[in-house]
Each structure stands twice: as C-alpha cells, then as structure tokens.
Amino acid sequence: MGLIREMAVQGAQMVFVLLLAPLLLGLTRKLKARMLDRVGPPILQPYRDLLKLVRKDVVLAENASWLFRVAPYLIFAATWVAAALVPTFATGLQFSWTADLIAITALLASARFFLALAGMDIGTAFGGIGASREMLFASLAEPAMIMMVFVVALVAGSTQLSWVANFMLTHASLRVSLGMALVALIIVALAENARIPVDNPATHLELTMVHEAMVLEYSGRHLAVIELAAALKLLLYVSLIACVFVPWGLAPPRSGFWPLVVGAGTYLAKISVGAFLLVLFETSIAKMRVFRVPEFLGAALMLGFLGTLLLFVSRSF
Amino acid sequence: MPVVVALWSVAVLIATAALAPLLVGRPHGATRFVYTVAGLVALVLAATGGAVLLGLADGSREVVLPIGLPWIGAHFRIDPLSSFFLVVIDLGAALASLYALGYGAHEEHPERVLPFFPAFLAGMNLVLLAADAFGFLVAWEFMSLASWALVMAHHHEEENRRAGFVYLVMASFGTLMLLLAFGLMAGPGGAYGFAEMRDLARSEWLRGLVLGLVLLGAGSKAGLVPLHVWLPLAHPAAPSHVSALMSGVMTKVAVYGFVRIVFDLVGEPAWWWSVVVLGLGALTAVLGVLHAILERDFKRLLAYSTVENIGIVFIGLGLALAFRVNGMAGPAALAITAALFHALNHSLFKGLMFFGAGAVLTATGERDIEKLGGLIHRLPVTAFVVLGGAMAISALPPLNGFVSEWMIFQAVLLSPDLPQWPLKFMVPAVGAALAFSAALAGACFVRAYGIAFLGRPRSTASAEAREVDGFSRLAMGLLLALCLLAGIVPGLVIDAMGSVATQIVGHAMPAQPLLPSLSIVPVSESRSSYSGMLVFVFILMSSGLAMWAIHRWASRVVRRGPAWDCGFPDASPVTQYAADSFAMPIRRVFGPVAFRSHIERSMPPPGDPSPATLKVVRHDLSWEILYAPIAGRVSWLGERLNTLQFLSIRSYLSLVFVALVGLLVVVAIWA
C-alpha cells in the first residue's frame, strides 16, 4: 500500500511538471507584455499553441533522416525525466535516488546533444550556426553548473537533491559560497533556457539566435514536443533554484495529504515569484553580442569555482 | 594454470605471426586465417583474465621460463591488476580481429599488416603477464616495434613516414626512461623480479626520481601532454582496426605500466606525487579535447580525443594517490575504480569510434569530415552505432562514459578532507577542468557526427557511399552493446573490480546492491546514487509514451517538402555549416590562449587580380616550445660530430686512448 502511494506521488510529480510547464511560459509572456505596457496573449496561450501544433501535419525537409524524427521525442524524454527528478512539492520521492544533480545536468546535456544534431541534420546554414553556438555556450555553462553542484554538495554533504533540500531546510544559514552558487546557477539558467541576455526567445530570423535556429526546420507535432521540452527545462531550472535555495514548504518524505497540498501551494507561489523576477531581469537588460556571452558564462564558472575553493579551504564559508 | 594458458595463447599468436608471411600468396585466405586465430586467442586470453579477476582461477603462482637473462629467467604471473587489463585489452583485440575480418579484406598490402597484427597482440599481452623487469621491458619494446611496423604499413605516403619516424623516436625514448626507472628500482643488488623489487626499501628522492621517469616513459606511450605529439600522427596512420587497438588498447597498457610501478612496485608515494599527476591529467584532458575540436581529419580527431581520455584516467589515478597517501582507503578505492573503469570504457567507445571511422573510410575513401555529409542515409547501421559511440564518449547518460566520469566527480567531492593545502587548491581546479573537457567533448562529437553523418553530402564519394560488410557492422554493434551494458549495469563492473582496488589501495568500493534498483552507490545512499538502468528505462518509456500518445490521438501525417531555411533554401551543399565554421566560435574563444591562434588576412591592393586569402594560424605549443629546440640541438650536435666519421686511423686510436685514460681517471677518483 505504501509503495503504491509512493508511486502515485511520484507519478503525480511527473504529470504535475508536464502540465505546469506551459503555464509558466504563458505567465512569463503575460508578465513581460504587461511590463512593456502591452496586453499580451492569455496565460493559457501556450497550451493552445501546443494543441494546434500537435494536430497539424508534419512537413519534413526532403533529406531529413530518422534522427530528425526521433530527436524531438528523445529531447523531450530526457528533459522530462530530469524535471521529474527535481523535487517540486515534496522531497524523497520514490525514484529520487535514480539520478543525482550531476546526472540531471548530464541528462540535460543529452537533450542538448540531440537538439544540436537535429539542427545539423537538414544541412542548412541556420541549423549549423545554432548548433555551433549552443555547443559553445554549453562548453562554459556545463562546467559552471557542475561547479555550482560542487558548492551545494560540499555544503549539504550530498549530491542527492532530496537530501540537499532537507539539509537546507534544517540547517538554513547565509553562506558566501551559496550566494556565489546562486548567482552562477541563475546565469546558467538564463543561458540554458535561451533567455535574454544570451538569446532572445521571441525572435526568428536574426543572426544572433541560437535555440530558434536549431529548431527552424521543425513543424507540427515535432515542434510541439520540442517546445514542450523547452518549457519543461525552464520549469526545471526555476524548480531547482526553489528547491535548493528556498526549500521552505516542501513536504518531507512519506508525508500525509495536507503537507503535500501545502507543498504544492508554496511551490506555485515560488514559481510565480521566479517568473516575475525573470521577467523583471529580462526587461531591464539588453541582449548581448554572441562573443560577449562566453564572458558572461565565464563569470558564472568563476563564481562557482570560487565558491568551491572557499569550501575546500573551510567548510564554514 | 591460467598463466600457462595465457602463455600458450601468446605462443600461438607469435606462431601465427611467423606463419603469416608464408601465406601471403593467397591474401584472402591469409587474412581470414590470421584474424580468426587472433580473435579466438584473444577471446581465450580475455576469458583467462576474467576468470582470475572474478577469483575463479588463481594466477598468482609464478611460472619461470628459462629464457631471457640466464640468471634471472622469465617470470610470469597474473594478479588481479594484470587480469583486469587482460580483459580490457583482449576484449578490444578480439573485436578488432572480428572487425578486421571484413575491413582487412580491403587492405592493399596485407603482407605489411598480417604478420605484425598478432605480434602486436602478443607484445601487449606479454607486458601484462611479465613479472620481472627484463621481461616487461622486452615485451614493451616488442609491442612498440610491432605497432611501429603497423604504422608504417602504408609507408608510401609521406605523412605516414614522418609519423613512423616520430613514433619510433618517442617509443625508444619512452623505453629508455622505463629502463632507467627499473634500473633505479632494482638497485645495486639487481632485484629484477617484481616480488623482490616490491620488498626493497628506497629513499624518498629515489622514489620521486622513479615517478618522474615513469611519467616520461609510460606517459609518453599513453599520450600525456606534452609527450602526446606522436600520438595524433601515429594512431591515424595505421589501418583503422590497428588505430582502434593503439588508441583504445595500447594506451591502456601504458596506464597499466604506470599503475604497476607507481602503485605497486616503487613503495610508499609522497603526497606531492598526486599534485604532479593531477596537474598533468587536467592539462592533458583540456588540451586534448581542444585540439580534437579543431581537427578535420576524422581519425586524428579521435586520436586527440584519446589524449583527452587518458587525461581523465590520470585525474582519477592522481586522486587515488592523494587519498592513499593520506590513509583514506574508501575514497582511494572509489578513485582508482573510477580511473580503471574509465580506462575500460575508453577502450570500448574508442574502439567503436575508430571502427566507425574505418567504415567511413572504406565507404568513401575520405578521412576529412569536411568532404563528407549525409552518410546517415547511405550507411544506416554505421551511422546508428557511431551515434551511440559519440554519446558514450561525450559522457552522456545512460551510456558508460558518464558513469566513470560521475564516479570521478564523486571522488573530487570527497577531497576537501585532504590535509595538504596545495591539494586543496588543486582538486577543485581539476574538477572544473574535468567538467570543462566533458562539455567540450560533447561539442567535439556533435561537430564530428553532425558534419560527417548529417546534412547533405559534400562530395560524390559521400553521396554514393555503400554500407560496409557484416563483420564490421557486427563488431561495431557488439561494442555498442557493451557500452550500453556497462552504462546500465555499472554495479557489476564495479563489483568485478573489487579485487583490483584491494590489491592497489588495500580497500575496495562497497559491494553494489544489484537489486532492487541496479543503482550504484559509491559512498553511502545519502550522499549520491545513480541508476543507469532506471534512467535508460525512463527515457525509453517516456519517449515511447509521448510518441504513442501523439500518433494515436493527434496527428501521424508526414509530408515531405523542400527545406525551409528561413525562406531562402540554397541547393548547393557548400552553403551548409562546415567543420571549420562549426569550430570557429570555440577557436575564437579558447584558441588565443591554448594555441596562440590568430587569423592572417591578405588583401591584394586595388588593381591586383590575385585572390584575397584568409588563413587560420594555429600553433602546437608543446611542439614549438619543447620539441623543436631539442630537435634543433640534436641535429646541430649531429652535424658537429659528423666530422668524427672521416678521421684517420691514427686519430681514432688516439681518441680511444684518451677515452681510456679519462675513464681510468674517473675510476681512480671514484675509488
């Protein structure tokens, strides 16, 4: 009985993130429009877009290979599995020990690997430019992420997210290293989700684009699955920041019904605040030139590295 | 018993090598015969190694053969360390033989490959079996020379002759260093057997000197920066199945030599050794992958990636040294297991990638990825397995490359407890370098795969490529299966390596619970765990579910049309992103530091009809700073000494006389 309940909670988490991801996207778009004094699309618009895309025919380029057709599903699966392993409303879920934070980072790297390959499959200049830049950014964002994982793991004594969240709940303290890790993680999250100042999620046909260039040839259900994966990734990063740095409200392992409801409620509040802060940041900064981005990401890498170094020197930083 | 089986197997290999020249009258039959025998013998050797590794057979009793130096003889035994490497090496060798059954049929000069292939295998196995310094060095040199002959198989190409020359010089240098190292370790008493050598006490500076010599000797064979310069020349020059062996397997023999001497024979290490090894490992990993990412020659790219992976193995070994010195047995076991696991993984996926490069070479005659493209349509099976290999080598879950790198990260996270301050500052930097090289490896293989296999064909050879033979496909498929297996049930591999870790650092990793989760837990469940199996199953399930649901309830129609390309599709394949353009951002960001790279533009003045040129200049700094001056001095000295060749007999006699007097004076002063 207990096992079935645990599985149900885990399943609920998987469905929860899947359903919530487009909402977060809609919320950011709406907030951004309001801040720019526009009315903006309804918050539920991303769901309608996805439904529309799913029902449309796929138009494949003549020389698209099987990889091009399989890649969207693999990208989606890797992102979804990663998102399902980040505690949102409860810690210690049934499968939380499947992968730790390093493995979650690597799962996202797998998704990126296939996305970049899919961008190169048709053999267009746009796909290649997107893939090339994405891999350049990743070559700095990934080590920055690992360094941030090091900081968190050295503070909490674990790379397991559930343990980290529980540790942060019980041993909450202000630490220099954690501050550095937070800034590093935010920079990585901006880069990985193709947000301003690294990339512009709202443009097509602009030479600085990265993510949109890779998915340019996709249409119909394939595009829908990729868009959903992108939305999941944004939700994943917001959840990750919430779970590690503001873990309050998370339901402990094997808790009853009401703590789960409280957890879900606080989680929704946290991601709303996260969306607001993201939009606030995006509207107050301009997009960078491509070759400024490595410096921006290099700053994240250095911050993560410094944080790790401080913890190697003394655990009390 | 296992030692005897192994020695007989090596004897069969040598006999095959001797027999091969007699069979070249019928090249086809000879190819079949040599590779079949080599493959079967390698399987026997791998099984022997596996039996000792799992404790099913005992190979610790020494077998002494009356060959070699008369008062020493030749000692052989199989302990857990050599049994592990026997498995790694002979698994790779068996699959290379299987691959060569198909690939070798295209060989233009089988007489230049067939005798040396079994000899090469025999040499590598003898290095592992040897239990005395003399046998080890002879086998080491035998392996080097046999592989040199294979590098020179296509010697009519200028480039290969140069590769062969550089390789020969570096190999001789490496063996000389090992000879000196063994000489120092054997001491004045001449303790050449490993058993006596282990018991000998040595002063600390002597042990440090041995470490330096081993780093030069084994490190040059393994490809540690800055001793790696021969590797990207020599490995690609050989036929592809030999490239796979040299890159995937022979570098592991070098790792074995390093571990054998530094962890086993020389005695208690000092803590600063780990600083040296970690630093070299990190430098090797980063520079190797940066070189790889700019390379256009598919096989040379893979050779540079070997340099990177050797760096990762040495990072693991350095961590193991640091933990062992400080008496932290558990973390030391984790680090050494991770390092050796990565060595095994590298032998699997690098073999696979070189086989893939060989298949591309057979199908198109091209090694330059810039002239390929669209091969996924022409070589469906090769494209699929190479995709798997590229994922494994980029350390992506659920494949095997990720598991070993994950374990090294876990070992890094245990290192704040190390007491020495330089190590405290060093290890985080090494961790960052490891993460950086893993991310760059991803970029490198997206580029290699995307340019060579995806997109549109850039040459007719690529457009008309034909899928390779069944043997090659089978060998690649088996390697991919092994990569996946080691990725999803890593606990089995870790448990099997328990005896090796116990032998080297006196402790093994905790037994990995096989059920219910198939997850691996390096330290404790609260610290970290990873289950490749579940990740694999979850990805399969969720992608399958998504695919099924969408096809069932939404749309399943597919229409084909011209590429969209923002409305301006261009029919010419040269408008695609090219290999150099893909690497350009990375070159621009990291190149000025790593290679002092810059761009030379020349614009002809107005009225001059000659074309403008743009050239990327890239320097291999280790070559220019280290090798070029040494080579210059040597040739300068050679020219000066050249006059000594043309003296009269009187001058020679007086020279001999002066030398004799000089030596006597030295002896007189010494006494």
Image (tube, grey):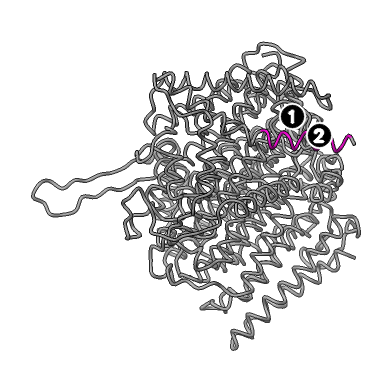
- x, y percent for residue B195: 85, 50
Amino acid at the residue labelled 2: Val
Q: Which residues are magenta?
A: A2-16
Residue found at the very far top of the displayed protein: A174
The N terminus of chain B lies in quadrant? bottom right
> Going from the N terminus, do you reach mark 1 or mark 2 first?
1
**Residue B15 drawn above or below residue B251:** below
Please give left or right for residue A101 compared with residue B595 in the image: right
Where B315 sits versus B306, above or below? above
Using the rendered image, report if marks 1 and 2 lie on a common chain. yes
Q: Position of residue A267 (x, y in %)?
A: 67, 22
Residue lying farthest left? B607
Q: Tell me the SS state at disc 1.
A: loop
Residue to which mark 1 is pinned: B414
Camera-near label (1 vs 2) is: 2
Say whether marks 1 and 2 touch (CB < 8 Å): yes
**Vertical comparison of B529 with B628: above or below:** above
Residue at x 47%, y 49% (from the top left corner): A219
Residue A287: quadrant of the picture? top left
Tell me which chain the residue with mark 1 is part of. Answer: B
Please state which of residues B433 and B198 is positioned toward the viewer in this rendering. Answer: B433
Q: Nearer the viewer, residue A205 or B416?
A: A205
Of helix, strand and loop, which one carries label 2?
Answer: loop
Distance from disc 1 to disc 2, alpha carbons, whole Å, reads 9 Å
* Badge 1: residue crowd in 10 Å (few <14, some 14–19, many ≥20): many
Identify the residue position indicated by label 2 in the image. B523
Magenta stretch: dominant SS? Answer: helix
Say left or right for B44 vs B446: right
